[in-house]
Image: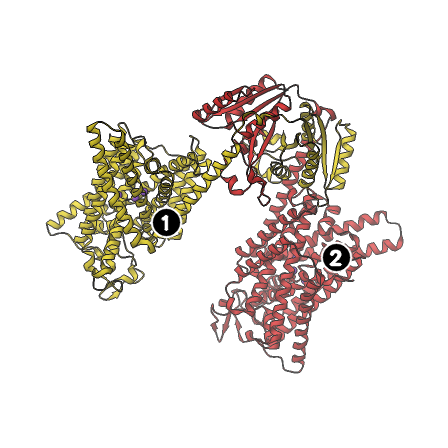
Chain colours: A red, B yellow
């Protein structure tokens, strides 16, 4: 069986915004330039099908999954792997940001009263996805299948009906067809000269947004049914064909109905020479087409818009599945904090979900849910991973060919290598075009984010490596050398049950020496403790440490350091009586001195910290949150 | 010497807003009603001088300081003390909120371009005061003396010059004198009937804002030079006289120049029947008087406005000195968390400063720096403490009279008791008027806050009491009973130096039994640890605990509970190998399993937790922040 629906939403949903990007970029050079949109779309489709063909080789070569990060790491080394990882992390965050922003614009199409609230809506949507995914959802195929098929059926159906209307001469003009476009200064004469060529390339690289999501399949191979590679490859092919068909259909219909979309309607759209002004609400291309073909407010219109919004939400959701898995793999390789390594426990997965949600929220807020501006960042990440991954595949086949003897296999591998090489050349070219035409439009932000992530992951790994080196058991038995003496030191602040228990435990471990100490913060309090000590005839000497600055930790440190000077090979065990309360607010009102003391003592060599807890009644409440308190 | 300048700013600064409150309340009944303002001011001055006379008895009776909280607690019991404490805490927060809000309005008078930004300015001012006080300021008398004397000199000077101008017929009308007042519906015919009487009482209770700050002296007695009581009493008298003179002078001059201030200029002020509209910026009374007497933009005008703004900032600052002291006293008595108890350490003081700042910031933001609305809350807190404190003093003298034999002393005490009784009667009456006339205008919020604080402090004290009862050493030696056996359990996750050190420490303490355990989270990792264990021939048995849910803490808990079932009187010492990194971000990337493990183990009876730290090189960096890491 082919798992199209589950993994397809990310890739298919790109049809919800990619056509818009082509049209609104061309619109900068006026109405005539927009008529070139089908040709730009064709170029995008060629790249799309090439990338799909290329990725079919990937999933055959790496049926175990792992995706672009594994391919790059295995064939091109760690730096390439880390680069792809950075690109993919950025990609996931932007998948959520772009998809939810676009979805909020489709929602506004159906409910115009919400206009202007796109960013808050997208933000709330992300928050809901985070909560839903934190709770955990059973991935039921049927739930994923419905919006995927609904989206494909409604968009392709709309294109077919539109084509029929056109053939019978019944296709209406889009509501926006009557607008004139104000070209950008320098592009008044259309797509001519260097500026025109540059804009054409920009439109093409904007259209490359149609490819986003293809990489999601290759990272999801392990989840396919067996035979995994075959299923994944077939899914990819189907996906490519459907994506291409939808893109072509939408662009053709948009051309036929003369849909006008621009980046800033207030200044770029005019009717009879008068700007439409700030009150005009521009709908996405699919919405405008549904309006034109089915009529505004018709049921079919709402079905198309709803299906598009829904597939965008599902596309975001796939990122919430993919991101924690990638983060876990990176954490396992030591590039991300260990807390992100999922070993089946919910906690680690949660860290990934929350990180992704926070990242996407930040982007939505910073970019005010502006799909066009977010897409500039999105495409860079996607094409970096495309390009490096294909380069890795070339190296992969070359290495394999070095050992493979079977003629038939060699033939197959050479063929795969050619496909990947074409894919590499194509994606590298597109990446170059994207970088050149989009650098100042936001691509630099994506590169900066990737660079930052790269540096972060590199630093974390270096840290782990250096810790592991330092902790390694180099010369076997040395670490086992026993201390020459064990000295017990009991910290006392009051004569209460925790302190007496600490004394008992210390005595039970029969140390070579046994001393109690009290820091003299409040003379009155100290005097009372000493009296109690005598009255109870506690058989342990009590030393008073003076504290000129009324501070608890430093006098204890000074005492221990002085004691250690006389016996550097001796062990000092510091007993800390603590009491444990049950509720969080109870913890708040207890002094945190024990916590600070323990934290500081961790930095002193030759010292072991022994916490002696006394459980108060409230700590035994079954519904209490466990919170350790402090008895100092 | 009399310490007037240092403690005077809080009380004197009330002249910056109290006259405005009288005038704008009367303005609700039209222009004729406003002419009654000097009489209302006179009533306020009578109360002010009575309260001052009353408080002079307080400082004589309690020269050691302690203030209203101590007086109420000592003479009327804990509930009365707690009520006063709640009122004083609210009072401090409102001193800051009101003074900084008022100061920001005076700033806008001098720099009109800042109009509309009063709340942000006040908020920034509070933030700056918090930072300055966190850093700590040496209280130099001269610094405090300057604004106090400047304020008194400039305001009284202004009144004198205004009086001279009036006498010579040169006193101009205030710029706002030309406005007509729109009376509130029901008060169109001026101060007649029940509504009129009620408004007069409201104006009087608004004017009671002039008394805020008098209580600050009685809480600051310990800081006076010797003889403390005499100096404090003289200061109080001076303060009362100056406050009364300024209030009288300002109201008289405002009457003579026909200053118009209202609560909402846009709707309540008209010129020739036309509302002034939202663009009119209303200046405080002192500003308007300075403008009238000296001329707008004159140097003298700026001096008066600057002196007023400055004294308001200094008044706020006194609250930052007083609040942490009161919080510390309350913490010592167990009513606030121990962290607020200052024993000379900066940290506890900081908690008080930050709490006060956060409270004042919240009020400024919620009430948009609206002085009039904030004052409704302020007066309640001040008069609650006035009233209860005077009642306490009556009881104090009655108790003293019960034992005093000397005729002369008895005479003095009876005289003091009469004064305090008059003070009590007067403040109780004002409190009643305030509650009746202001309840719906915001007084209920102050009462709610006081109730909340009362409940909070009561709950905290109950908690401390119950913990102390539970921990008390009731039957002496029982707590010293030694455990019958000591069993060492070492938690292992890797074979590295921290684990070997934990083993060595455990063996050095010669327990009755010694076991190492590892939780099998990752089969591969566990196998490696076991191989290393064998290779190094570590002479301690290693037990593998299975973990079906890949969770670390529960299997260890289950193991320990099972072990404790066989020996309930035995002690189990759990050794936790930890490594210590130096930088905070390093800590972030290490798994927090050890922390979670220790936190959870605190809740298990019969268990002692032994942390065995291994200091990594980075932890020995001198400039590193000490942060304990985890080796699990
Ligand atoms: K696609
Ligand atoms: K994607
Ligand atoms: K996508
Ligand atoms: K005053
Ligand atoms: K005050
Ligand atoms: K005041």
Between A35 and A507, the residue placed more toward the observer is: A507
Measured as percent of width and height from the top left, residue A338 is found at 66, 42
**Does A627 sit above or below residue A444?**
above
Residue A189 visible in the displayed image: no
**Does B381 sit above or below residue B28?**
above
Residue under numbered circle 1: B447
Residue under numbered circle 2: A55
In front of the other: label 1 or label 2? 1
Measured as percent of width and height from the top left, residue A264 is found at 52, 65
Going by the image, does A600 lie left or right of B558?
A: left
Residue B404 visible in the displayed image: yes
Between B226 and A124, the residue placed more toward the observer is: B226
Q: How many labels were placed on the picture?
A: 2
- Chain designation of label 1: B
Measured as percent of width and height from the top left, residue A460 is found at 64, 40
Quarter occupied by the C terminus of chain B: top right
């Amino acid at each position: 069986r082919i798992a199209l629906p589950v993994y397809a939403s990310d890739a298919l949903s790109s049809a919800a915004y990619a056509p818009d990007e082509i049209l609104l970029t061309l619109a900068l050079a006026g109405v005539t330039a927009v008529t070139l949109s089908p040709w730009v779309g064709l170029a995008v489709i060629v790249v799309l099908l090439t990338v799909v063909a290329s990725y079919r080789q990937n999933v055959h070569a790496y049926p175990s999954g792992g995706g672009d990060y594994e391919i790059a790491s295995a064939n091109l080394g760690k730096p390439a792997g880390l680069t792809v990882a950075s690109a993919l992390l950025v990609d996931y965050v932007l998948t959520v940001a772009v998809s939810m922003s676009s979805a909020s614009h489709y929602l506004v199409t159906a409910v115009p009263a919400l206009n202007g609230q796109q960013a808050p809506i997208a933000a709330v949507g992300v928050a809901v996805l985070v909560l839903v995914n934190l709770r955990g959802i059973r991935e039921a195929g049927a739930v994923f299948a419905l919006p995927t098929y609904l989206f494909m059926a409604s968009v392709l159906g709309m294109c077919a009906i539109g084509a029929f209307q056109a053939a019978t001469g019944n296709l209406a003009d889009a509501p926006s067809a009557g607008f004139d476009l104000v070209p950008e200064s320098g592009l008044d004469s259309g797509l001519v000269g260097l500026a025109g060529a540059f804009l054409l390339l920009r439109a093409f690289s904007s259209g490359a947004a149609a490819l986003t999501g293809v990489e999601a399949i290759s990272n999801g191979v392990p989840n396919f049914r067996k035979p995994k590679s075959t299923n994944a490859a077939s899914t990819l092919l189907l996906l490519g064909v459907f994506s291409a068909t939808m893109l072509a259909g939408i662009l053709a219909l948009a051309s036929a109905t003369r849909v006008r979309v621009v980046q800033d309607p207030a200044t770029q759209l005019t009717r009879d020479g008068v700007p439409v002004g700030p009150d005009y609400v521009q709908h996405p291309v699919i919405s405008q087409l549904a309006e034109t073909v089915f009529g505004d407010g018709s049921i079919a219109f709402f079905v198309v818009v709803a299906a598009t919004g829904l597939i965008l939400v599902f596309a975001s959701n796939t990122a919430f599945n993919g991101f924690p898995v990638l983060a876990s793999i990176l954490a396992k390789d030591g590039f991300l904090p260990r807390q992100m390594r999922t070993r089946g426990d919910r906690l680690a997965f949660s860290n990934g979900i929350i990180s992704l949600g926070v990242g996407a929220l930040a982007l939505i807020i910073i970019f005010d849910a502006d799909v066009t501006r977010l897409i500039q960042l999105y495409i860079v990440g996607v094409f970096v991973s495309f390009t490096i991954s294909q380069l890795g595949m070339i190296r992969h086949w070359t290495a394999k060919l070095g050992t493979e003897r079977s003629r038939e296999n060699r033939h197959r591998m050479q063929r795969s290598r050619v496909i990947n090489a074409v894919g590499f050349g194509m994606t590298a070219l597109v990446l170059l075009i994207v970088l050149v035409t989009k650098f100042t439009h936001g691509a630099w932000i994506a590169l900066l984010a990737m660079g930052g992530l790269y540096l972060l992951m590199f630093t974390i790994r270096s840290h782990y490596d250096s810790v592991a080196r330092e902790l390694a058991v180099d010369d076997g038995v040395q670490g086992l050398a026993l201390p020459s003496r064990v000295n017990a030191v009991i910290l006392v602040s009051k004569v209460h049950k925790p302190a007496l228990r600490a004394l008992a435990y210390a005595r039970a471990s029969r140390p070579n020496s046994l001393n109690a100490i009290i820091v003299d913060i409040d003379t009155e309090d100290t005097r009372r403790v000493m009296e109690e000590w005598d009255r109870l005839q506690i058989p342990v000497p009590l030393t008073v440490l003076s504290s000129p600055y009324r501070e608890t930790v430093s006098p204890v440190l000074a005492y221990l350091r002085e004691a250690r000077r006389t016996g550097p090979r001796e062990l000092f065990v510091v007993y800390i009586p603590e009491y444990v309360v049950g509720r969080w607010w109870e913890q708040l009102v207890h002094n945190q001195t024990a916590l600070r003391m323990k934290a500081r003592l961790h930095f002193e060599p030759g010292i072991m910290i022994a916490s002696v807890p006394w459980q108060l009644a409230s700590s035994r409440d079954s519904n209490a949150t466990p919170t350790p308190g402090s008895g100092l």
